[in-house]
Image: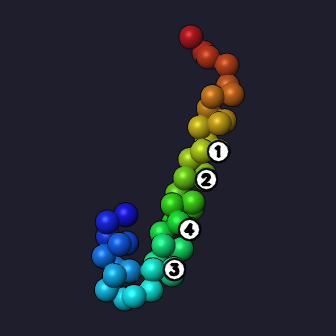
Amino acid sequence: MYTSYEISSRTYRPLEVYTLVALFYFMLLAPLTALVGRLEGRPALV
């Protein structure tokens, strides 16, 4: 987040920078959330 702050202060375009950071964050966490949901739904093997 600090890096995005520095980039937005240098380029004077905070909307574009923070939008790209949010999209990257969503693309990273959406599949992981789905994977964890599947893993939690399985019965324990032990």
Q: Residues within 10 Å of mark 2 (few under 14, many from 20)?
A: few
Cβ atoms under marks 1 and 2 closer than 8 Å? yes
Give coordinates of residue 43: x percent, y percent: 67, 19
Q: Secondary structure at mark 4?
A: helix
Identify whether 45 is placed above or below 41. above
Give coordinates of residue 24: x percent, y percent: 51, 66
Cβ atoms under marks 3 and 4 closer than 8 Å? no
Tell me which numbered mark, 4 or 2, is placed earlier along the sequence. 4
Q: Which mark is residue 23?
A: 4
Cβ atoms under marks 3 and 2 closer than 8 Å? no
Identity of the amino acid at label 1?
Answer: Ala
Tell me which numbered mark, 3 or 2, is placed earlier along the sequence. 3
Cβ atoms under marks 4 and 2 closer than 8 Å? no
Q: Residues within 10 Å of mark 3 (few under 14, many from 20)?
A: few
Identity of the amino acid at label 3?
Answer: Leu
Give coordinates of residue 2: x percent, y percent: 31, 66
Q: Which residue is mark 1?
A: 34
Q: Which residue is mark 3?
A: 15
Seen at 61% across and 53% down, the residue is 30
Cβ atoms under marks 3 and 1 closer than 8 Å? no
Tell me which numbered mark, 3 or 1, is placed earlier along the sequence. 3
